[in-house]
Image (cartoon, rainbow, N blue to C red):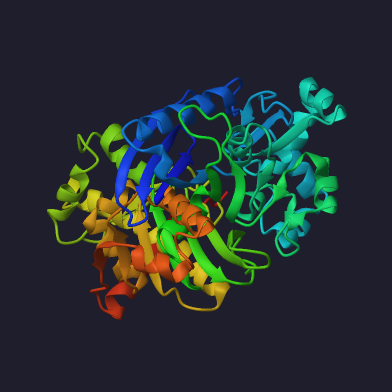
Amino acid sequence: MDYILAIDQGTTGTNALLMDRNLNSIAEANVDFEQHFPKPGWVEHDLNEIWATVVQTVREVTKHADVRKIAAIGITNQRETLCFWDRKSGEPLGRAIVWQDRRTSSQCEELRAKGLEPFFQESTGLLLDPYFSGTKAAWALANWDDLKTAHKAGRLAAGTVDSYLIARLSGAAVHATEPSNASRTLCFHLTKHRFESELCSALGVPKDIWPEVMPSVGTFALTKNFPGLPDGIPVTGVLGDQQAALMGQACTQEGMAKCTYGTGAFMLMNTGRKPVKSRHRLLTTIAWSLGEDQFTYALEGSAFIAGAAIQWARDGMKWIRDSSEIETLAGSVDSTEGVTFVPALTGMGAPYWDANATGLFTGMTRGTTQAHMARAILEGVAFQNFDILTAMQKDLGKPMTSLNVDGGASANNLLMQFQADLLGVELRRPKFTETTSLGAVFAAGLGAGLWTDLSEIEKTWKEDRTFHPKISGADRDQHLKRWQNAVGRALWKG
């Protein structure tokens, strides 16, 4: 029994991956599901539709495999999306409120006006934002009668998507989560490692709706009545998606970081055994827990625009027909000839935090071509990531030791080389780029005893290519100077 089944439940679909202990992929499947937008700014998921995609993808990856070889199941998931279900039957009690949902913006403003944001940041490592689960829970309990009724009857269970999947996999026998997901709720204390009454009270959320918190690795539940699987397969590893990618990238040591280049860019840096408070409004979060009082923390930051800038060049400007073509176009010139792009197409996040900032090109002349502008787009993505990763290093008080990359745009060699040049560290791209699913495999394998510790995971991680910094310090400084000049023009002057 050396197969591991990973369930990666994402925002737009579910991916299932069956792997063996040597990281040979046996089968993989993905199924999308519908997004629901009942009002402007509201985003919801139907939990029965999500569950149907889990069943369908698992059935697909196991149809030609001997399911008796499955030693363990790992789960990774969209993190802040909040689910409600009947703790007796496991049936949903309304739709899930998705992490993208903004319906609690006014509630967050009211809490900030009361001066509560420092309290929440100190206790949870998070900022007051509709992104996180806590204000979603307060809103739902105030507005959905079915939840009020279920709570009065002692039947209401709430939690992030991992908790819902654990409940369904176990036949409603288990209501549990783990710290990387719990630490995204605004109700979980970073160092006390528990849902805290004071935090719940400040939000108006009853503490008893939340699940039991277990270490990220270990036995959470046993399968019961899952279509196509025998009863009794243990769920032994659970991680939120970005933390799963950190583990999947084998960033197991302090100072190691990962960047996922998706529509935006999502960065986590392992900060070791103690939480690091950010001076740049980055998030402090729990990376994972390998046992009682064995916690690893991380700093998290994201750039709103990464692959989306390439999509804009393709769909908005019509400069390319396929996203992959931008590397050839950008590579047809040796430099941008001074052209700089600030990808603030939806404002700027950390460390600037200016929602009114706008995207712009600077340094253009009569000699500027599409190729120069295409190269500037790629450099702009790297520049903003440099700012976030530099802020993380300042918060940690130590240099970053390496950056591991994944996501669609990580296939762009020109972008990866420029990112390494700016940061002055090695940038490593793995052979297996589905690092979120791989993190769930690693967590489940640790929980099932297929690997004994994180050092074994480091040995199993396989590299595709390393990008070494090539430019001089003087050239790097010149690049950063023109970037800062451009950013200064992009920021809102009011």
Q: Can residue 238 be seen at all in this image of the molecule?
A: no
Looking at the image, residue 220 sits to the left or right of residue 394; the answer is right
Camera-side residue of 254 and 55: 55
What percent of the width, then of the height, locates residue 82?
A: 65, 36
Looking at the image, residue 186 sits to the left or right of residue 281; the answer is right
Name the residue rendered at 62%, 36% in the picture.
Answer: 170
* Figure check: 30 above or below 459: above
Name the residue rendered at 56%, 74% in the picture.
Answer: 396
Looking at the image, residue 385 sits to the left or right of residue 184; the answer is left
What percent of the width, then of the height, locates residue 424?
A: 34, 74
Looking at the image, residue 375 sits to the left or right of residue 491; the answer is left
Name the residue rendered at 77%, 36% in the picture.
Answer: 138
What percent of the width, then of the height, locates residue 27?
A: 32, 39
Camera-side residue of 290 and 229: 229
Q: Give the residue furthest to the left.
A: 332
* Figure check: 85 above or below 410: above
